[in-house]
Amino acid sequence: NAGVTQTPKFQVLKTGQSMTLQCAQDMNHNSMYWYRQDPGMGLRLIYYSASEGTTDKGEVPNGYNVSRLNKREFSLRLESAAPSQTSVYFCASSAPGLYEQYFGPGTRLTVT
Amino acid sequence: QKEVEQNSGPLSVPEGAIASLNCTYSDRGSQSFFWYRQYSGKSPELIMSIYSNGDKEDGRFTAQLNKASQYVSLLIRDSQPSDSATYLCAVGADGLTFGKGTHLIIQP
């Protein structure tokens, strides 16, 4: 049981490049989330998906898109990366009704 | 704008003592409250959840909730050096609002 997995672990992009961060969970959870964590700012919600086929914006959605590919997978796409998107990105999932979220190991992204 | 406030610390506690971490939140309608532990360079790890007023104990950890005062706390008894980490308070349901965390240092 791997829990929540994320790929890649590290990534360096140039301004304007695009990339997709991948997240998968094997806990049969309905809800999945993307957060970013910046020094001095704490964790902030980017997007979430309460169930397969639905997505909703969080606190900081600008510059990102998401896809809930199936119940297991939830991807985050940066279409045109900017230095302000340099951050650590965490994916999380939760079981229905409990709201206890379990986090993946994170992706450390640097945009130059 | 929902807010969760924590003292950033560092909070320094002698080994074996009780560490007390506090958190206040702005959304009076909040129903779910969580404490996460995060070691440097690692992801947040859920250590406690609490949903109703009062105390909830799990091993050396006790979470306390007072909805009238919009206050959540975490007590760590018999603190160990391995408890040294940043503790994040989180509030909400679909999508959590996190505090910025309290850096706890347990001194041997």
Image (cartoon, coloured by chain):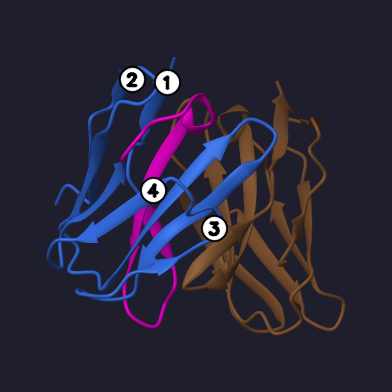
Q: SS at mark 3?
A: loop
- Measured Cα–Cα span from mark 2 to mark 1: 6 Å
Q: Is residue B87 above or below residue A101?
A: above
- Labelled disc at residue A13: 2
Q: Which circle, 2 or 1, is nearer the viewer?
A: 2
Three-letter amino acid code at the position of disc 3:
Gly
Query: Which badge, 4 or 2, is on the more N-terminal residue?
Result: 2
Quadrant assignment for the C terminus of chain A: top left
* Colour applied to chain B: brown
Residues in magenta? A79-102
Horizontal placement of B104 versus A63: left or right?
Answer: right
Any idea which chain is the blue one in this picture?
A
Instruction: Say which residue label 3 marks.
Output: B59
Chain ID of residue with mark 1: A
Q: Nearer the viewer, mark 3 or mark 2?
A: 2
- Amino acid type, residue under disc 4 in the picture: Tyr
Q: Residue placed at 78% from the left, 50% from the top?
A: B6
- Residue B17 numbered mark, or none: none
User: At 25% across and 34% down in the image, what residue appears?
Assistant: A19
Label 3 close to label 1 by CB (< 8 Å):
no
* Kind of residue indicated by mark 1: Thr
User: Dot 2, crowdedness within 10 Å: few (<14), some or many (≥20)?
Assistant: some
Query: Which of pointers 2 and 1 lies earlier in the amino acid sequence?
Result: 2
Q: Chain of mark 3?
A: B
Nearer the viewer's eye, disc 3 or disc 4? 4
Give the alpha-carbon distance from disc 4 to disc 2, as whole Å.
15 Å
List the residue tagged with mark 1. Answer: A110
- The answer to which image quadrant residue B82 occupies is top right
Does label 1 lie on the same chain as label 4?
A: yes
Instruction: Determine which residue is flagged by label 4.
Output: A64
